[in-house]
Amino acid sequence: MRFLVFLLLGVTAQLGMAQAPKLELPKLEVSVNRVEQDAQHMYEVDATGTVAAPLPKVWRILTGYERMAEFVPDMESCKVLSRNGNEVIIEQFGVARFLFMSKTIHLIVRAVEQPMSSIDISLISGDMKHYESHWELVPVPETGGTKVIYKGRMMPNFYVPGILGSKMIRSDIERMMSAVLARLDRRDAPRVEAIPQS
């Protein structure tokens, strides 16, 4: 199930003055609801977290789709098939794991970008009956950081245990979002310029 929420789809700033008090960032909040649609189970997901990184860095990482597999759990590959303006077609491979089983998942999705603001993702084809998600980025002026909001609706086309489904998806959402937020907040190593030889 971890792969269900890797789509994204999917941040370090210091306070202006060293002596300024460090504000506590809100912890990750996740909710998952199982709803009925056309006599089938749909999962609605909401997740919110805040990172210290500024909005431009968050945007650059979340739209660097081909590097997602480096930090999103259970994503094996992510490839941009085409880009036309703010619309990106993406192919993703990953693994869904639950109980003692695992299933390879293949998806092709459409991402529509609103620069520095949001990414809307919808399913074109693959191993889901329904998938849509919305990433929203909100600057936090008090810290120079960014609030990251994820909302999704998903319906697998394979069996998900009814009673355990919501708990499993919640656990996987928390794992995925924690990994994404950790990557956004990671300090990137400074680039070292080559010293010209005299």
Image (spheres, grey):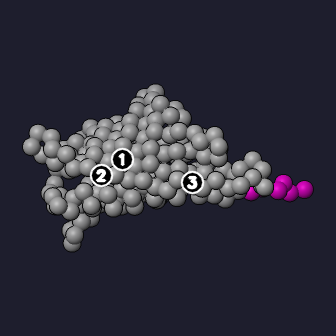
Amino acid type, residue under disc 1 in the picture: Asp
The residue identified by callout 2 is 32
The residue identified by callout 3 is 25
Relative side of 172 to 22, left or right = left
| Residue at the farthest top position | 85
Q: Main secondary structure of the magenta part?
A: loop
Q: Which mark is residue 46?
A: 1
Quadrant, the N terminus:
bottom left
Relative side of 155 to 52, left or right = left
Tell me the SS state at disc 3: loop
Looking at the image, tell me whether mark 3 or mark 1 is earlier in sequence order: 3
Q: CA distance from mark 3 to mark 1?
A: 18 Å
Looking at the image, tell me whether mark 3 or mark 2 is earlier in sequence order: 3
62 versus 103 height, above or below: above
Range of the magenta residues?
191-198
Q: CA distance from mark 2 to mark 1?
A: 7 Å
158 versus 56 height, above or below: below
- At x 40%, y 45%, the residue is 150
- At x 54%, y 35%, the residue is 116
Q: Pick whichever, 166 or 98, lies toward us.
A: 166
Dots 2, 1 in contact, CB < 8 A: yes
Q: Position of residue 143 (x, y in %)?
A: 65, 46
Looking at the image, tell me whether mark 2 or mark 1 is earlier in sequence order: 2
Amino acid type, residue under disc 2 in the picture: Val
Q: Position of residue 10 (x, y in %)?
A: 44, 47
Tell me the SS state at disc 2: strand
